[in-house]
Image: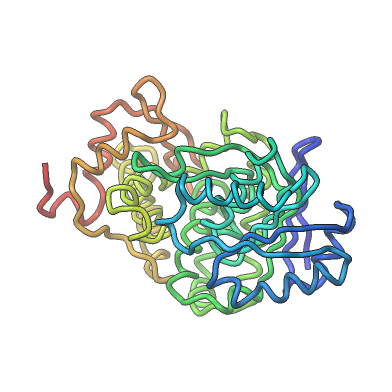
Amino acid sequence: MDALRVELGERSYDVRVERDFDGLGQALSARFRPGPAWVISNPVVADLHLGAVLASLRGAGFAGRALLVPDGEAHKNLESWSRLVQALLSLGVERGTPILALGGGVTGDLAGFAAATTLRGLPLVQLPTTLLAMVDSAVGGKVGVNTVYGKNLVGAFYQPQLVWAAISCLATLPRVERAAGLAEVIKLGVIADAAFFCALEERASALAAGDPGALAWAVRESCRIKAAVVGQDEREGGRRAILNFGHTVGHAIETAAGHGRLRHGACVAVGMVAECQEAVARGLVDSSLLDRLVALLLRVGLPTVAPPLPRAALLDASMMDKKRAHGIVHVPFPVQPGLAEMFALMPQEVERLLDRVPGTAAAPLED
């Protein structure tokens, strides 16, 4: 369908939004010499899509083979990464052997980190199969794993050489999984493109229903916006940090609840509400944006209220935020629809922000 370009000099690459995996092997043959190619996936995704990927690879002369990793956020950890690296080394991979990450964000992050670190770098291709991975984790080069201290605290910036988003994969997702991906789509409208945010409001019903045309449009537009941001700031030294809207609070919720217990997109949705509330309280943005955000999240099936969580656990998780420097956490707040700016929060201001998490402040909390 479409190809978008992430412009990063010698690390530039295409993001292809396609109907299925037909043509994938041909696209790879223009980048790599036909030979061994390892597809990293999980059992659930492999049952659905691995056959089509391997057929496309073999049709272009690649000896495609698969390695499976466990499914779920709970397995995105150093132990799984270590096992995957050891498996790749035992199979005799070479520096030119492409690694294809077939799955959602967990598989993409885990396989990407293995590719970044094995033999000091193997060629990486992202094949996202979830909406969240297509619009967020597969684009931009962030790879890594979680620890008990927080989400994505061990990892690297490692750009893929191609991203291939097969829209047909989205038809296999449960409704709740598609909704989780829409959190990252909505985020981009709030912080980077007011016209896109308005269009999402207009197409909310179609997106919630899983309309293929609406989803393909959302993926293309989201990748366009994110590619532009990443192209300006690859390593999150400036503008790219606005992409963390909703994530300071969202990651704290995920960590406090236990990785894998709550969907990332659901946590980001609640995080966006809390952070937008703080922006309104600071006088940075009109309350009408908060009202529109809450209404849109509810229309697409996302939560705006968190389950009861220990306040102490939320605070501990927030203090391990990757964006922390000298005890200060840098948080993006919307200042108008389609525009966000970064603000430095002292620890007591982070506490106040977490107290805005809907559903937790009024609930009994453990000290």
The x, y position of residue 23, in whole percent, is 83, 69
Q: Nearer the viewer, residue 299 or 6?
A: 6
Count of picture labels: 0
Residue name at image x 31 percent, y 50 percent = 253
The x, y position of residue 189, in whole percent, is 53, 54
Give the side of residue 207 with respect to residue 63, left or right: left
Residue farthest toward the front in the current orientation of the protein: 90
The x, y position of residue 294, in whole percent, is 36, 60
Q: Quadrant of the C terminus?
A: top left
Residue name at image x 56 percent, y 50 percent = 109
Residue farthest toward the top in the current orientation of the protein: 326
In the rendered view, tell whether residue 363 sits above or below residue 350: below
Residue name at image x 27 percent, y 31 percent = 349
Residue name at image x 76 percent, y 65 percent = 64
Its colouring scheme is rainbow
Report which quarter residue 11 is drawn in: top right
Give the side of residue 140 with respect to residue 52, left or right: left
In the rendered view, tell whether residue 243 sits above or below residue 186: above
Report which quarter residue 212 is drawn in: bottom right
In the rendered view, tell whether residue 167 sits above or below residue 310: below
The x, y position of residue 195, in whole percent, is 59, 56
Residue 56 visible in rendering: yes
Report which quarter residue 3 is drawn in: bottom right
In the rendered view, tell whether residue 347 sits above or below residue 62: above
Q: Quadrant of the N terminus?
A: bottom right
Give the side of residue 222 with respect to residue 327, left or right: right
Residue 288 visible in rendering: no
